[in-house]
Image (cartoon, rainbow, N blue to C red):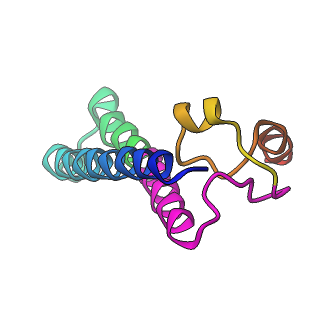
Amino acid sequence: MNKKLLQRYRGQLLELRDRLTEAIQRISETVRTDAQPVGEHDRHVSEAPDMELVAEQDEENIRRQVMEALKRLDDGTFGLCQECGGQIGLERLDAMPYTPYCVQCERKVEAVS
């Protein structure tokens, strides 16, 4: 992969990292603000913080993957599948620059999960 392409992916990953960090902070603030007092029994209201926590966990998981992709850029392994060592297709990297797996290995990993 050429240097210009690697720089483009680094820029995308840094931008995504920053957006996710902001989103996680907003969600955390919302959860703290919307926390119910003890003894509240309104089921609709009590489920909202749970859904926010799930969203926060999802965003944090993607942020972790972005940080790992940035490390791969630094160590020269970006674009290589972490499972088989083959090249990850550019179309896949364009869609998900933080992906650690090629399409075939992603399917295998998902099947095991």
67 or 54: nearer the eye? Answer: 67
> Is residue 102 within the magenta segment?
no
Q: Is residue 45 left or right of residue 68?
A: left
Q: Where is residue 91 in the image (x, y as percent from the top left)?
A: 62, 29
In the image: residue 97, left or right of residue 42: right
Counting from the top left corner in percent of width and height, residue 47 is at 36, 35
Q: Is the magenta stretch mostly helix, strand or loop?
A: helix
Asked whether 91 or 64 is in front, the reply is 91
* Residue under the image location 77 percent in, 36 percent down: 103
The residues colored magenta run: 57-85
Q: Is residue 80 left or right of residue 58?
A: right
**Which sits in the foreground, 107 or 33?**
107
**Residue 51: quadrant of the picture:** top left
Q: In the rendering, at what x and y percent does residue 46 appear?
A: 31, 38
Residue appearing at x 52%, y 55% in the figure: 65
Question: In the rendered image of this protein, does residue 82 appear above or below residue 111?
Answer: below
